[in-house]
Amino acid sequence: MAYRADNYDVVVVGLGHAGVEAALASARLGCRTLAVSTNLENIAFMACNPSIGGPGKAHLVREIDALGGEMGLAIDATFLQMRLLNTGKGPAVQALRAQADKRAYQAYMRRALEGQPGLQLRQAAIEAVLMDGGRVAGVRSRTGVEYGAKAVVLATGTFLEGRVITGEYAYSSGPSGQLPAQGLSDDLRESGVRLGRFKTGTPPRVDGRTVDRSRLTEQKGDERPRRFSFLSHPVPRPQLSCWLTYTTEETHRLIRENLHRAPLYTGVIEGAGPRYCPSVEDKVVRFADKARHQVFLEPEGWNTTEMYVLGLSTSLPEEVQWQVLRSVRGLEEVELLRPGYAIEYDYLLPHQLDLSLQVRGVTGLFSAGQLNGSSGYEEAAAQGLAAGVNAARQVQGLGPWMLRRDEGYIGVLLDDLVTKGVTEPYRVLTSRAEYRLLLRQSNADLRLTQKGRELGLVSDERYRRYQERKAEIDGLRRYFAGSLAGPDTPLAERVVQAGGSPLRRAETVEALLRRPEVGVPDVAAALADVAAADRECLEEAVLEVKYEGYLQREQQQVARFRRMEERHLPQDVDYDAVMGLSTEGRLRLKAAQPASVGQAQRLEGVSPADIAVLLVYLEQRRRVRSPGQGMEAPADGQ
Amino acid sequence: MCKAGFGRSGKALDRRWEQLLGDTIAALATAVGEAGVSVVRLSGPEAVTCAARVFRCSRLESLAEGRPRRVYYGWLLDGPGGRRLDDGLAWFSRAPHSFTGEDVVEISCHGGVVASRLALEAVLRGGARLADPGEFTRRAFLNGRLDLAQAEATIDLVQARTGAAFDAARRRLEGELSRRVSSVADRLLGVMAEIEARGDFPDLELEELEPPQVSRELRACMEALRELLAGAEEGRLLREGLRVVLAGRPNVGKSSLLNALLGEERAIVSAVPGTTRDVIEEGLVVEGVPVVLADTAGLRESADPLELAGTGRTAAALRQADVVVFVIDAGAGWLPEDEAAAAALPKTPVIVAVNKSDLRRWAPETAMIERIAGGTDVLEVSARTGQGLGALRQAIARAAGVRRREEPMLGTVRQKHAVERAVASLETAAAAVEGGVSLDLAAVDLREAWGALGEVTGENAPEALLDEVFSRFCIGK
Ligand SMILES: Nc1nc2c(ncn2[C@@H]2O[C@H](COP(=O)(O)OP(=O)(O)OP(=O)(O)O)[C@@H](O)[C@H]2O)c(=O)[nH]1
Ligand SMILES: [Mg+2]
């Protein structure tokens, strides 16, 4: 017999990286929130690599942070190693990456959840979403407990009908030996939600004591580690290294000889896997002429010797994994702790969602994270934040909240998922962002903290820090533009030392900064007024000067882009009644119900002619609704 | 009425997508080649600025300083800061007091195919974009300058035009130009993939891309595109005009017609069949259309090796023909040799000229004509008396217009403009790379170049770049 436990504003199902941010956002916006997990020991668990950040991903973490999310603070508190990547490249692709202490990260997140007023944790396996007409009414657990809810956020990750495969063995399971979520898939299908199946994989874990580090290349963290969160204070502290090694001819031979036992090739695995995260069997087959592949050993925590073997993702039989591991340089004596495996899981075809991550046609049902066909903790967390915010706003009767592609990687991520759909687990990349020079990780707060403040997620402290940073950057820019450096000043000397042509007369600091040979260290060392400035603020101000031309060009592109994005498409357009649409265009528009003309034009199968027809239709409709407006006799004929 | 029409199937990176509204468009406002004067029309917020970049007023510093609805005399330049192309008149109206409701400029200059398309290309270089089919009308409607009934007509127009344009686009896609653009686009994509892979996957152990190596590759792409621009089919049309070929069995009076149309005795005429042994070409202007008129050796089976060689050259000339004038002899009527000659005609528009109509009034039966694939007009002419020659000129110009209505001309203006934009972006990128700018910044221009090329090939889905990255590099955990 079902029993009614309690009523909540928002129930979040699943407490992985998406669920955690969703629950916190919802509660922070004042909603009475219940967050449910099948196992409260596994909150914010990193089922794959123990690392956060990298190009695109670091951008997401900083955006989450700028909006008042938790991920950046959590990794800053628990990192084992911090590195800024792509330092030799341009501002668009520079990105932080951290190795995480997995356990500490989980403990941090659990504390954050427990410290959040209005948020209740519960261990339960949810197997049904309760409906009331076209609205969500709550959820029901396997043990028959019902929780009433005005909005539900599903964030079940790779758990839905999870199936783990190693060699010839396949069994129902969530990642890393956890319980799969069973029953919920069928329940969703009954509500008309369509699901697909993906696979992903993870490498074996080994005992670090049995790794011969003398044969590996050490990769240390940065001497002055930076931080993800705009709220954290970077402090130097001990770090752990990663270790680089390579596969050998022997590794490749072993894999080739055992391909007939690889589930990927025997047809045991049906789901589509990600191209950017191929199994080692895949790499050996697809890049047969490569003599060796990289393998990174990454520490998993301060209190464990366990190491993650990045590069050897595999679902080969366990005894083959042993041989493969021991064929790698420096791993000749290695002890396997946990075998690698492939996991198949159900995901929700994300084009059924609107840009607020609400399932179209089911008011109050939101979906976030790997369940939506994405991959990665950061992608999950970003969706979690968006879904949590939108669930709360739904309950509070406020309109949906979203970011556009020109405002953040979060906007790119959501639009890509919803508008284009997925054919493999989706990973964010800087190359996916059209306006990536504007969407730097270094200016996430400048772009988004004001918005987060308006939403109600940004604390007074965070807001104050943002205002200070903004003021400091603006002040530096004014200083650069307004102060002159003469030919015999220290800055001029540094210019010459750096190989620049000598100054003939005084020039503004700004003009000197535009020279390629002049950079942050020069102004910091040569100008007393600048020396005291916060390093990141200085970097940001210099960057804005140096790349002004490119930034302006992207801004112009954005202005064009916005014109279409801001053409709102009413949700009650009857596309069957729009005369002149192509058959395919009509079908796509009907299925996707795009929110704007801009989104419509990104749909596969919608042609420029369809957009032209749509614009004309919208204008017709506007005139019919407000007759007598907008008509004037043409000034002259055509 | 705007005459542009080139649909495309690619997506996203294309700036035309972003600009369906609110940017500045241009098109020819008069029918090409038929009028003595051609008018280029611009509409959009930048219309006056774009026009002022390529139209130098005689009395003003810049057209932008002028007053609306006043006519200014001046010179059209072939591009911003370029050389003088033609003299002409320009006037503009300001939003909302124009027929599109936006700023509108009209520049009138000399008519004719060459002059008008050069004028159009000039304003495109000034920063306007070639208008889509029906786009002026559509804007007029969207800006409240047309009523509902007119708007419905617009939709039909958009439909009809785009249908035809898509066909034309497909035809061109199969064409040489597109294939060659594709190969450059692929090469460019390769460069971009190398850059992106290094940015998005810093752990890959790839050697750093050396700026000289990148700029060399970019310059090679530019070179290939420039060559392509110079050698493009439409470039030939522009330099040489429409290729009109006189063909038919021996002795029907082809050489006599060439002479009559030229007004001079250029080709040898004789009563002996097989007089002309080689292809004779002459340039002339027919109804404002520049034409290369070719007289050919009569088509027949022959054992004479010299004549056989002539027939081979005739076949070659026919393959290159834009329009064929198929000559038959009214005096002799339809002979088996005519039948054989007709079978050798290409699938280009064919005008049937029934020559020697001074000898007897005779017209071929429809059944005969139908066997001529692209047959359109049948005209009675006489090289001797000059009768029907005016009609023949008009038919040739019309046949050129048939080609125009399929819009390869404006289609190629668009393509050419796209390729030119790509070259400009590549130039910016190469210069930046050479100046030490980091590659992910230069990528901004590379994306623009690639997007422009995608307008020609129809292939510019952003996914293509990722596909390229994943197929080149072994990426992953
Ligand atoms: N009566 C009359 N005779 C013509 C006319 N046009 C050409 N002829 C005569 O027809 C004969 C052949 O004319 P050509 O112009 O040499 O014929 P062609 O088609 O060039 O012949 P080949 O070069 O041998 O293929 C000459 O004797 C011309 O004078 C015409 O309009 N009327
Ligand atoms: Mg002759």
Image (cartoon, rainbow, N blue to C red):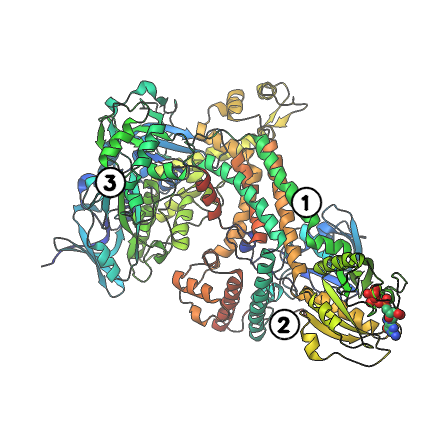
Residue beneath disc 2: A633
Q: Secondary structure at mark 2?
A: loop
Binning the other alpha carbons within 10 Å of mark 3 as few (below 14), some (14 to 19) or many (20 upward) gives: many
- The chain that hosts pointer 3 is A
* B167 vs A439: above or below: below
- The chain that hosts pointer 2 is A
Binning the other alpha carbons within 10 Å of mark 1 as few (below 14), some (14 to 19) or many (20 upward) gives: few
Q: Which mark is residue B227?
A: 1
Residue beneath disc 3: A167
Q: Which mark is residue B377?
A: none
Q: Residue furthest left?
A: A1
Q: Position of residue B468 (x, y in %)?
A: 47, 43
**Is label 2 in contact with label 3 (beta carbons under 8 Å)?**
no
**Nearer the viewer's eye, disc 1 or disc 3?**
3
Three-letter residue code for mark 2:
Ala
Name the quadrant of the C terminus of chain A: bottom right
Three-letter residue code for mark 3:
Gly
Q: Secondary structure at mark 3?
A: loop
Q: Residue furthest bottom?
A: B361
